Image: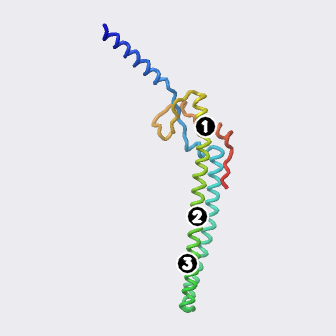
């Protein structure tokens, strides 16, 4: 009888704990979609893409100018003295190195701005997710890329985007 009571108590506790774990609410969110389609994220992405394209155009023009200078220098090589040619070639190399440095700095600046924008968005998104999960009783929110199969009713991406758009309409990246 003593063992029967222990068995009953253990079984009861196991069932109660299993039931309490089964009642947890789980949701998922598409973080990539949130970062790319929210007003602030889309604005930041548009700004960064425009900056990148403008820089690419500027650097492309500089590159073609440097190539023309190189072709002109090679064409005039026979007309110049060796010292003159060497001086102009060294000057052209300095221009090329300066061009490469500016281009690399420009790309690094854009990458840093992209990382800063992502950090700002994620920092603003964290309290929104915490508040949303507290208000709606979610115990676990997963990123959609880590979900293999899930009911579409568990997707909270759109409500989170609406709240994020209200609280953070734009990012200042300049």
Distance between the alpha carbons at the discs numbered 3 and 2: 18 Å
> What secondary structure is marked by label 3?
helix
The residue that mark 3 highlights is: 93
Quarter-wise, where is residue 97 in the image? bottom right
Image quarter of the C terminus: bottom right
In terms of secondary structure, where does tag 2 sit? helix
Name the one closer to the observer, 82 or 37.
82
Sort mark 3 into few (<14), some (14-19) or many (20+) by Cα contacts within 10 Å: some
Out of 2 and 173, give the one closest to the viewer.
2
Residue density around tag 2, few if under 14, some if 14–19, many if 20 or more, within 10 Å: few
What is the x, y in percent for residue 173?
66, 53
Q: How is the image coloured?
A: rainbow
Q: Given the current orientation, which residue lies at the most extreme top position?
A: 1
- How many numbered tags mark residues here? 3
| Residue corresponding to mark 1 | 127
Residue 37's image quarter? top right
At 67% across and 43% down in the image, what residue appears?
168
Q: Which residue is mark 2?
A: 105
Q: Label 2 to label 1, Cα distance in Å?
A: 34 Å
Left or right of 40 in this view: 141: left
Label whose residue precedes the other's in the sequence (3 or 2): 3
Q: Which residue is painted at 57% across and 43% down in the image?
A: 33
Question: SS at mark 1?
Answer: helix
Farthest residue to the front: give it: 2
In this view, the mark in front (3 or 1)? 1
């Amino acid at each position: 009888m003593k063992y029967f009571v222990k068995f009953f108590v253990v079984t009861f506790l196991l069932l109660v704990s299993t039931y309490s774990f089964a009642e947890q609410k789980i949701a998922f969110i598409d973080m990539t979609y949130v970062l790319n389609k929210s007003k602030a994220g889309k604005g930041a992405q548009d700004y960064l893409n425009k900056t990148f394209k403008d820089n690419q155009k500027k650097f492309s023009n500089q590159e073609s100018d440097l190539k023309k200078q190189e072709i002109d220098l090679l064409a005039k090589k026979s007309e110049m003295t060796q010292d003159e040619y060497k001086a102009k070639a060294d000057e052209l190399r300095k221009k090329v190195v300066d061009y490469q440095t500016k281009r690399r700095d420009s790309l690094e600046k854009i990458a840093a701005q992209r990382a800063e924008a992502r950090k700002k968005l994620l920092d603003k998104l964290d309290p929104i997710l915490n508040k949303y999960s507290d208000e709606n009783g979610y115990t676990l929110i997963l990123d959609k890329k880590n979900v293999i199969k899930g009911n579409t009713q568990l997707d909270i991406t759109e409500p989170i985007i609406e709240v994020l758009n209200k609280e953070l309409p734009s990012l200042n990246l300049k």
